[in-house]
Amino acid sequence: MTRPRQPRAPDEKLAPLGYTRRWAERGLLPPPDFLEEQLRLFAQGDDKSTEHYRYGAYLHYLRTHKTLTDAELDNYLDVARHDQDMMMASSAMVDLFGQKLSDAQFEKLCLTLKALKDFDAWMQKWIRKIIAQQRLRRTKKAART
């Protein structure tokens, strides 16, 4: 599902990849060398699906931030909620379950995912299932400690 066009990227050369000002304002833009490599690959033309490049940026952010402050989580969720490709962005949000989240952060993530309305019944069911699995995983982990 695509959304209306977002404001232009902070650097016009990043706009073809779908990066908006929000990425820079919220501190989620990857380092310049990472972005240059994405631009090089995009220019080669093998993969013109811009959501793949942004998803790579989400994964890079999570690899470099093993734990997130509340502000970092809010920024990540804000960028993802406003992405033009909600299917990919919801996957990026689900990837947050792999981070070390506080109980409050976990609940915020669950509420954010439940509030996504742009999906069909199957996708909403999948999100509910993921949340239930993650709740069970957290409960089992807490019982072991």
Image (cartoon, rainbow, N blue to C red):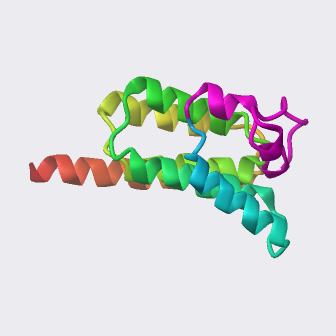
> In screen coordinates, is 144 left or right of 135?
left
Seen from the viewer's position, the closer of residues 23 and 32 is: 32
Give the residue at x 40% y 49%. 64
Most distant residue in the bottom direction: 46
Give the residue at x 57% y 49%. 58
Most distant residue in the right direction: 4
Is residue 122 inside the magenta stretch?
A: no
- Rendered location of residue 100, percent (x, y): 31, 44
Give the residue at x 55% y 35%. 76
Instruction: Please tell me whether residue 44 is drawn above or below residue 4 in the rendered image.
Output: below
Seen from the viewer's position, the closer of residues 58 and 120 is: 58
- Rendered location of residue 5, percent (x, y): 90, 36
- Rendered location of residue 127, percent (x, y): 58, 50
Give the quarter of the image for residue 34: bottom right
Residue 96 seen anywhere in this rendered image of the structure? yes
The part of the chain drawn in magenta is 1-27
Is residue 11 inside the magenta stretch?
A: yes
Instruction: Please tell me whether residue 46 is drawn above or below residue 57 in the rendered image.
Output: below
Give the quarter of the image for residue 107: top left
- Rendered location of residue 52, percent (x, y): 71, 61
